[in-house]
Image (tube, rainbow, N blue to C red):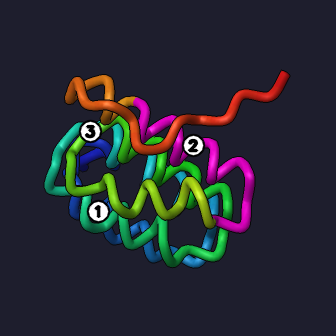
Amino acid sequence: MTSKRSSGGHDWRRKLRDPSPLVRREAAQALGASGRATEVRELLQVLTEDGSAAVRKAAADALGRIGHHSARPVLERSSRHDDDETVRQAAAAALARLTAASGETPAVLPKHKE
């Protein structure tokens, strides 16, 4: 018997479509922890289409951990336009990680509340 983690990204990608937001959030977190750029497309879709803010936030966090440049346009859009503030903040933080990793000047800076 294999565990969820040892069964590979395919099971986690399938779980991104689970009816439960808790399962989808866990799947996004697991895919981000994998660090594999092959997971970016699925996570971008979750970030733009999932109805749960917690799941979208997990996808933004995961994209920041993976750090693939192809996520930049969607993260920029989400950091400005997502309906949920926690998702906007997570997307901005993911952008900051991408920027730090690439040495570029940030296009969007995370907002800091004082």
Query: Looking at the rendering, in which quadrant would you find the C terminus?
Result: top right
Q: Is residue 17 left or right of residue 56?
A: left
User: Exactly how many numbered labels are in the figure?
Assistant: 3
- Look at label 3 and name its amino acid: Gly
Q: Which residue is mark 1?
A: 11
Q: Label 2 crowding class (10 Å Cα cut-off): few <14, some 14-19, many 20+?
A: many
Q: Disc 2 versus disc 1: distance between alpha carbons? A: 25 Å
Question: Who comes first in sequence, dot 3 or dot 1?
Answer: 1
Compared to 114, does 36 lie above or below? below
Q: What residue lies at 32% left-to-right and 53% top-to-bottom?
A: 72
- Locate residue 64, reporting x and y percent: 38, 39
Residue 90: assigned label: 2
Report if residue 87 lies within the magenta region.
yes
Q: Are marks 2 and 3 in contact (CB under 8 Å)?
A: no
Q: Disc 2 versus disc 3: distance between alpha carbons? A: 13 Å
- Look at label 2 and name its amino acid: Ala
Asked whether 69 or 44 is in front, the reply is 69
- Locate residue 29, reporting x and y percent: 45, 44
Compared to 94, does 17 lie above or below? below
Asked whether 47 or 70 is in front, the reply is 70
Q: Which residues are drawn in magenta?
A: 82-96
Q: Label 1 crowding class (10 Å Cα cut-off): few <14, some 14-19, many 20+?
A: some
- Look at label 1 and name its amino acid: Asp
Q: Is residue 72 left or right of residue 50?
A: left
Q: Which residue is mark 3?
A: 67
Q: Label 3 crowding class (10 Å Cα cut-off): few <14, some 14-19, many 20+?
A: many
| Picture quadrant of residue 43 | bottom left
Q: Disc 3 versus disc 1: distance between alpha carbons? A: 22 Å
Question: Who comes first in sequence, dot 2 or dot 3?
Answer: 3
Asked whether 52 or 74 is in front, the reply is 74
